[in-house]
Amino acid sequence: MSIETQIVYPHTTVRAMMLVIDRAPIKLCILVDLEGKLARTVVDGDLRRSLLAGISMDSPASDLPAQDVVSCLAATPQNELMTTFINNPSVNAIVLIDKTRRPVGLVPRAEIFSSILLSPPHMGLSESNYVRKAFDDNWIAPAGPNLNAFEVALREASGRAHTLALSSGTAALHLALRVLGVGVGDAVYVSDLTFAATLQPVLYQNALPVLIDSEPQSWNMSPVALERRLARDATNGCLPKALIVVHLYGQSADMGAILALTEQYGVPIIEDAAESLGASYGNRPSGAHGLLSAYSFNGNKIITTSSGGALVSDREDLIERARMLSTQGRDPAEHYQHSHIAYNYRMSNVLAGIGLGQLELLQDRVARRCTIFETYRAGLDDIRGISFQDELADSRGNRWLTVITLDPDLISRHPYQLLRELRSKGIESRPAWKPMHMQPICAGYGFEPHSHTDVVSSRLFFQSLCLPSGSTLSDEQQQRVIACVREFAKG
Ligand SMILES: Cc1ncc(COP(=O)(O)O)c(C=O)c1O
């Protein structure tokens, strides 16, 4: 936004400043010193207070008291501007300056907060009522009626008989490993293409991850790689103690093939369904196939409790053991006795109230994200070189995030260039997860590729970008994103 008409000088009078503010699109003027460097901003209220304090309409700006001004360098990224606004709640515009402190632009608060975000929280109408009830009843604790009701409601959404609400999806995965007895030196197979939270709990247990590559259709664990690895490890007598399969970006893994293989070798499955609540595989919800499953309700998920997670299973004994471990593992006695190393992992009754309201909206949220996916597909499908994460037959994803791949043979520019172009227009996008076998924390651990000529997970990482997919995304905003991607693809 051009700011020339809003710049005033030490000799500019109060009257002239009032005229500038009156005509300006953002209601302030920018006072610079005699070298043109930013001194302060002046708004109506500053002038009113100064007039009341005794200066006149003809007094110069230099008579105004000095005042701190919120400014940022011109190249400051969108997220840092957002943080600056959050830290300065009374500021309505940030002055952009060059390296010599000369003002070069002005960013209004509304512009930053109307940015298009990747997957922001989307509250309904009843969440605050449940939270209010927690306050009214003084159930401000990791126990209470909201928590109980949330666990009951989650049974239906997950298709599981037993549910345990926790402080995060990571905690759910950690407890899953604990109740399966995974410990020091045990091998655990893990989907390679995932967020680090899938893997971290394996490392908490000092177990040894073996990373299984993706297959190209759904991007999830490759049954081909899994079969090869299981056969080899069975021959060598080192089968894993458990397997964690991820349903990436809300799309189901090939559970039919994976279950058949793990049953053959007697390996229990933990489903990392953090991203796939509301999706389905066969005629059951995603997360209703393995022995245990973890969901996440962090702020960017399809429904959220701000932070939170759940462990679910049809095995009551496993969930009850996890429940005990989630509350410091107290033995059944009047006094405080502990025979197990345990955790403080329970969800708060206040946050469960948010979850109750959000669960009521799950199907709406899934439907909206699926529409967003279809709109991206319709808007971009004709561009040679752009393709989408696919859905397996017999599964229905929740399309938590729409992710595109750019074929480098047809689109010469890298996805990060698209990311930067979107960012310059106030649109947030994200790289695909970086595969675990490429992560420093996984150096030295096993990795099984899909084929010896094609590592699918790293190819997807280098070629993909997650587009804004939140259920709050308006049609107009989505068309802005599509237009920007189309412009980029033209080269
Ligand atoms: C695939 C995957 N697994 C696990 C998690 C961990 O969930 P949380 O952030 O609730 O700990 C997340 C989300 O962050 C995720 O995307």
Image (tube, rainbow, N blue to C red):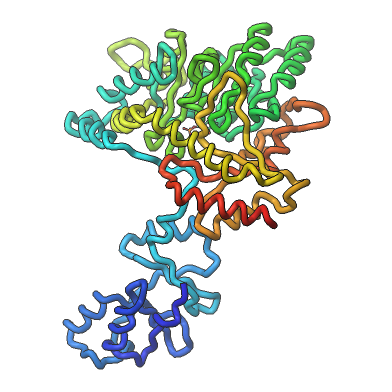
Image quadrant holding the C terminus, namely bottom right
Decide if residue 175 is on the left or right side of residue 388.
left
The reply to whether residue 328 is in sight is no
Q: Is 215 on the left-hand or right-hand side of 419?
A: right
Q: In the current view of this chain or complex, which residue is farthest to the right?
A: 453
Residue 325's place in the image compared with 364, above or below, is above
Name the side, left or right, on which 65 lies relative to 478.
Answer: left
Q: Is 401 situated above or below 283?
A: below
Is residue 39 or residue 466 the one in the foreground?
A: 466
Q: Tag count in the figure?
A: 0
The quarter of the displayed image where residue 263 is located = top right
Q: In this view, does 457 lie above or below 17?
A: above
Which residue is at a point 47% across and 77% down the rendered structure image? Answer: 103
**Which residue is located at x 29 percent, y 32 percent?**
350
Compared across the picture, whether 269 is left or right of 132 comes to: right
Does the image show residue 452?
yes
Above/below status of 243 relative to 369: above
At 50% from the left and 30% from the top, the residue drawn is: 398
Residue 105: x, y in percent? Answer: 47, 73
**Quick one: 455 or 25, which is closer to the camera?**
25
Quarter of the figure with residue 490: bottom right
Q: Which residue: 40% across, 34% down?
A: 304
- Give percent across and percent down for residue 44: 26, 76
Position of residue 437 measured from the top left corner of the image (x, y, whole percent) = 70, 33
Residue 336: where, in percent of width, then height?
33, 17
